[in-house]
């Protein structure tokens, strides 16, 4: 049985199980696996609904937010930190709520399936508790989803005001906004592949898929499974729902070919049913929306993000005036090809969220001036040679992080000047030393940050602080 066939089989079985009467998550016994934001919010919601709640995380309690720990403990949540006891999960539990960051083959996940315990996540749980007639715009894909989500939210917020909420992979956990969402409201959500792994009933009324390329394979095991988890939010859509797809990405077109919803598209190369680029103008069907000269964020990928956002908000009849006003003032999302400052006629860009090769390719393609590139981080077997077609403008490489020696070997193999440092801060001083007016210093490491940082945003914040410190010198 294929992964997709298995998914549909399990989905049907789980829906039949859920309909029996426990869909409202009351008076049940629930194990939450993983603390973080979603685990914390799920625990608070479930305990308020008279459930018996256990929350387990392998990290020591000292590494948790003490205020959150105290709050949950005072509310009656059973907290188990420091390990995953073999005897914790048994058939007495009704649900396992898995944090998206927990591996898909974790021993509790496998055991829950053996015991017939439904494995879902915080988004799936909160979705089942939403008021009726709430409209969801869901955005997924490998790259560009955060920018696209932010644009959609800002446009919809200007058009519809406080009826619009931001949740999901950015913003707030869905369960944390249930008390403010009302019938008729609109929720804009970025959905990750890790969340998609445990989607069963969740689906957006308007779904957007930005693009697919290989990423998170260490977590998802195979590229096919990765694409499938991304696509799951479309599988449950009704025929009246909308699926907005990147026409120029063949993997998207192939993966979503058989979804039942109405298909619409965006394309930077071809006139399509939806949003497309013609000369230097963006059209929605036959209607000119705006000129790309009014878009401040750099790169063709960001033009595509804007088109995806336009296609989504047009389903809610948002005017061209509002769309143009929001997009023309939008300067980007923090840590994603973010312009930081210009010092001594050198531009500094923070693209710390470029944790894979594809993101780095996109960043490099956005510049046709000399680039000093920070490259490296966590060793994940990155194939840096895939950057070759994009390296012409790179004048020097600053190799950093755990895989810095492999970066050095790569840079030397293509004849680039390379400087090797364990830490970003030391490499920054070298980048400043060798930079000349008209250069770009770019942090786009094509690598995760977990070798040295809790999260990649911390790496980006350090880079930005170095720029600010340079400005003050």
Image: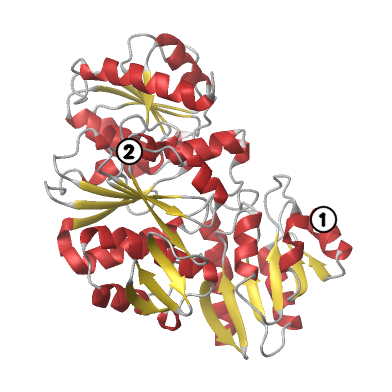
Inter-mark Cα distance, 1 to 2: 40 Å
Q: Residue 434 appears in which quarter of the rendering?
A: bottom right
Answer with left or right where residue 341 lies relative to residue 405: left
Q: Residues within 10 Å of mark 2 (few under 14, many from 20)?
A: many
Answer with left or right where residue 422 lies relative to residue 451: right
Secondary structure, mark 1, is helix
- Image point (52%, 19%), residue name: 107
Q: Residue 90: which disc?
A: none
Q: Name the residue furthest left.
A: 183
Vertical comparison of 417 with 103: above or below:
below
Of callouts 1 and 2, which one flags the residue occurring earlier in the amino acid sequence?
2
Q: Depth check: 473 or 393 in front?
A: 393
Answer with left or right where residue 156 lies relative to residue 408: left
Asked whether residue 337 is in view, the answer is: no
The residue labelled by disc 2 is 123
Vertical comparison of 361 with 290: above or below:
above
Vertical comparison of 306 with 228: above or below:
below
Q: Position of residue 253 (x, y in %)?
A: 50, 47
Answer with left or right where residue 353 lies relative to residue 284: right
Secondary structure, mark 2, is helix
Asked whether residue 285 is in view, the answer is: yes
Q: Are marks 1 and 2 in contact (CB under 8 Å)?
A: no
- Image point (70%, 70%), residue name: 373
The residue labelled by disc 1 is 405
Vertical comparison of 329 with 457: above or below:
below
Q: Position of residue 24 (x, y in %)?
A: 19, 26
Instruction: Please tell me whether mark 1 or mark 2 is closer to you in this view.
Output: 2
């Amino acid at each position: 049985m294929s992964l997709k066939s298995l998914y549909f089989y399990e989905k049907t079985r789980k829906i039949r199980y859920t309909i029996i009467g426990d869909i409202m998550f009351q008076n049940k016994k629930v194990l939450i696996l993983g603390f973080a934001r979603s685990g914390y919010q799920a625990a608070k919601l479930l305990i308020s609904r008279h459930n018996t709640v256990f929350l387990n995380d392998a990290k020591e309690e000292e590494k948790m937010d003490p205020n959150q720990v105290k709050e949950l403990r005072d509310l009656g949540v059973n907290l188990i930190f420091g390990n995953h006891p073999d005897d914790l999960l048994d058939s007495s539990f009704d649900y396992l709520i898995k944090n998206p960051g927990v591996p898909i083959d974790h021993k509790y996940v496998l055991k829950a399936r053996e015991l017939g315990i439904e494995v879902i996540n915080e988004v799936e749980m909160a979705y089942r508790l939403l008021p009726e007639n709430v409209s969801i715009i869901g955005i997924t894909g490998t790259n560009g989803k955060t920018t696209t989500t932010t644009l959609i939210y800002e446009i919809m917020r200007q058009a519809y005001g406080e009826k619009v909420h931001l949740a999901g992979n950015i913003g707030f956990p869905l369960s944390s906004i249930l008390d403010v969402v009302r019938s008729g409201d609109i929720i804009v959500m970025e959905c990750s592949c890790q969340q998609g792994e445990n989607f069963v009933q969740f689906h957006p009324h308007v779904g957007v898929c930005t693009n697919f390329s290989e990423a998170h394979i260490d977590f998802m095991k195979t590229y096919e499974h990765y694409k499938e988890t991304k696509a799951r939010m479309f599988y449950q859509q009704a025929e009246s729902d909308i699926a907005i797809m990147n026409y120029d990405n063949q993997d998207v077109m192939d993966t979503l070919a058989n979804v039942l919803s109405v298909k619409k598209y965006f394309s930077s190369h071809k006139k399509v049913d939806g949003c497309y680029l013609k000369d230097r103008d963006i059209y929605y069907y036959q209607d000119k929306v705006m000129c790309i000269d009014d878009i401040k964020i750099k790169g063709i990928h960001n033009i595509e993000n804007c088109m995806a956002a336009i296609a989504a908000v047009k389903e809610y009849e948002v005017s061209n005036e509002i769309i143009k006003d929001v997009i023309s003032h939008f300067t980007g999302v923090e840590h994603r090809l973010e312009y930081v400052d210009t010092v001594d006629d050198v531009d500094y860009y923070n693209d710390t969220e470029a944790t894979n090769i594809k993101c780095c390719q996109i960043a490099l393609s956005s510049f046709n001036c000399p680039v000093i590139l920070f490259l490296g981080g966590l060793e994940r077997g990155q194939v840096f040679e895939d950057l070759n077609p994009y390296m012409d403008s790179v004048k020097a490489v600053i190799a950093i992080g755990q895989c810095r020696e492999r970066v050095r070997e790569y840079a030397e193999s293509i004849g680039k000047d390379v400087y090797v440092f364990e830490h970003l801060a030391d490499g920054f001083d070298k980048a400043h030393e060798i930079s000349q007016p008209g250069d770009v210093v770019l942090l786009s490491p094509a690598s995760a940050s977990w070798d040295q940082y809790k999260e990649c945003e911390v790496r980006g914040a350090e880079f930005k602080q170095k720029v600010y410190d340079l400005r003050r010198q």
